[in-house]
Image (cartoon, rainbow, N blue to C red):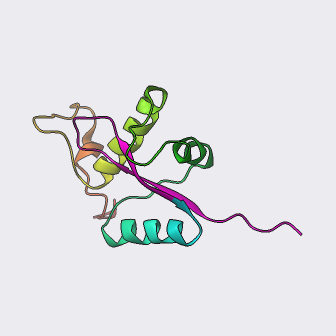
Amino acid sequence: MNKPKDKQAVALFYDGKNAPAVTAAGSGELAEQIIALAREHGVPLFENRELLRMLMDIGLGEEIPENLYLCIAQIIAFAYSIQGKFPKDWTPPADRADYYLDPHIPDDQ
């Protein structure tokens, strides 16, 4: 029988100035703790097995490599938008009213 794989998790820190860096990574119980802390602090979670493998190879405190910038930038942008966060002085395109929708309010209200 195949043993189920341990859960894995990686946490990134992004200050808006430098490249995102790995701040925590682990498997099994440590991964569960990383995920629990993220949920406790309202940090959006994103699951992607291939990306996880690449991020697990980065050392703690190290910035992500350039080849992951676009992928991680898109994830961060999505996470910010679902939390209603946008860059200072940013104006959404006039034809994109959905940028103003509160993700916590159902569409029919």
Where residue 99 appears, as percent x and y from the top left, is: 26, 44
Span highlighted in magenta in the image: 1-25
- Picture quarter containing residue 29? bottom right
Q: Is residue 4 magenta?
A: yes
95 or 49: nearer the eye?
Answer: 49
- Picture quarter containing residue 90? top left
Indicate left or right for 11 with 98 as reference: right
Q: Quadrant of the N terminus?
A: bottom right
Where residue 8 appears, as percent x and y from the top left, is: 57, 60
User: How many labels were placed on the picture?
Assistant: 0
Q: Residue at x 71, y 63 (%)?
A: 5
Q: Residue furthest left?
A: 89
89 or 43: nearer the eye?
Answer: 43
107 or 19: nearer the eye?
Answer: 19
Q: Residue at x 56, y 43 (%)?
A: 57
Q: Residue furthest right?
A: 1
Q: Residue at x 33, y 64 (%)?
A: 106
Q: Quadrant of the C terminus?
A: bottom left
- Picture quarter containing residue 63? top left
Residue 9 vertical position relative to residue 77 in the rendered view, above or below: below
Where residue 97 appears, as percent x and y from the top left, is: 25, 41
Indicate left or right for 61 with 86 as reference: right
Residue 79 vertical position relative to residue 88 in the rendered view, above or below: below
Indicate left or right for 69 with 48 as reference: left
104 or 14: nearer the eye?
Answer: 14
Q: Is residue 39 magenta?
A: no
Residue 11 vertical position relative to residue 87 in the rendered view, above or below: below
